[in-house]
Structure formats: C-alpha cells, structure tokens
Image (cartoon, grey):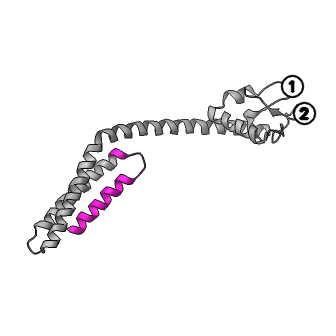
Amino acid sequence: MRVIALLALLFGFMGLLLLDGQVFTHAVFGIICGIAAVGSGLASARKDYSNEGRRWLGRILAILGAMLALFCVTRLPSAYRFQIRFNERSKKAREIMDATNRAEAEVAAVSVAGGAGAPAAACARTDGESTGAQMASTTRFELTQVITWMALFPFVPSAGCAQHPESKEPRVPTPLA
C-alpha cells in the first residue's frame, strides 16, 4: 500500500508541473491522487503486522496526500478561470492560423499561376498598378512576412520578383506605408 501511496503522490505532483494550459484538469487529477495517497497511507499505517517505523511512513504519506489534495482544492477556482481563458485564446489563435493558411494558399496559387517567386503581396508593376486582388486577400500576418522580406533585401528592390507578363520591366516591392 505504501508503494501505491507513493506513486499517487508522484503522479499528483507531476501533473501539477505540466505546462499545457489545462491547470484545472491537473488540479482535479491532483485531488484524486491526493485522496488515493491518503487512503493508501492510512491503510498501510493501520495494519497490525507492520512495525512502528513503517506505520510512520504510512502516516507521512497520508499527510502528504492530504496536503496535495488541499493544495489542489485551493487552486480550483483560479485554475478554472485560467483554463477557460487559455482555451478561448488557443481557439482564436487556431482560427487565425487557419485563416492565414487559407489566405497563403490563395496567394501562393495566384503567384504560382503568375510566375512570381516572391510573396505576391510585395510585388507591384513598375507602372504603378498594384495587384489589388492579392493585397485584399492578405492578412496582417502575411504583411509582417512581407515587411520582414523587404527588410532582408533592402538593396535589391526586385529580388525574387517575377516580371509582369506584359512588361519587360521587373516588379519592385510596393511600399506598405
């Protein structure tokens, strides 16, 4: 029984150390493990055939299990609020990433069809006509990628931009500001 109490304590405390945002779930698991440690520790301490030193070990494991359960109970309200906020934020981030991936796929399909080798939103024709449909489909994330791309290649304005099919002049990056 002491082994079960020790394993319950280890799993309960290890669950609290997980950093995956599900703190309420881990606190409930800690309560269950703490109760299991209390029960197993007290059962080990109650047995008549064990010597006095092992009885104290069972009582110590029961006290540690009670401390684990009490600690997890005190964390439940704030852990629930944190987990709800965390799940909402991760859902929003997942939706933004899905929208970004869809927009990037559209831009990539347009740029592959047009033969552009750089981000399509960064390129415009030299006669002043911008690719409005491509700019309309870009998201804020893509624009930061374009700004990063433009910062990496400031001295080569047409680096990676393909020529417009009707023009012999290369496309240059469009100023975003």
Contact check, label 1 and label 2, Cβ < 8 Å: yes
Q: Secondary structure at mark 2?
A: loop
Disc 1: which residue: 127
Quarter where residue 21 is shown? top left
How far is disc 1 from disc 2 in space, using C-alphas? 9 Å
Instruction: State the image coordinates of residue 124 (x, y, percent, origin top left).
Output: 80, 30
What amino acid does circle 1 point to?
Answer: Asp
Of the 4 image quadrants, the one containing the C terminus is top right
Q: Which mark is residue 51?
A: none
Q: Residue at x 42, y 50 (%)?
A: 19
Instruction: State the image coordinates of residue 170 (x, y, percent, origin top left).
Output: 87, 35
What is the number of callouts on the image?
2
Looking at the image, residue 81 lies above or below residue 47: above
- Tell me which segment is drawn in magenta: 2-24
Disc 2: which residue: 169
Regarding residue 38, the answer to whether it shows in the image is yes
Q: Single out the residue that lies furthest toward the right.
A: 168
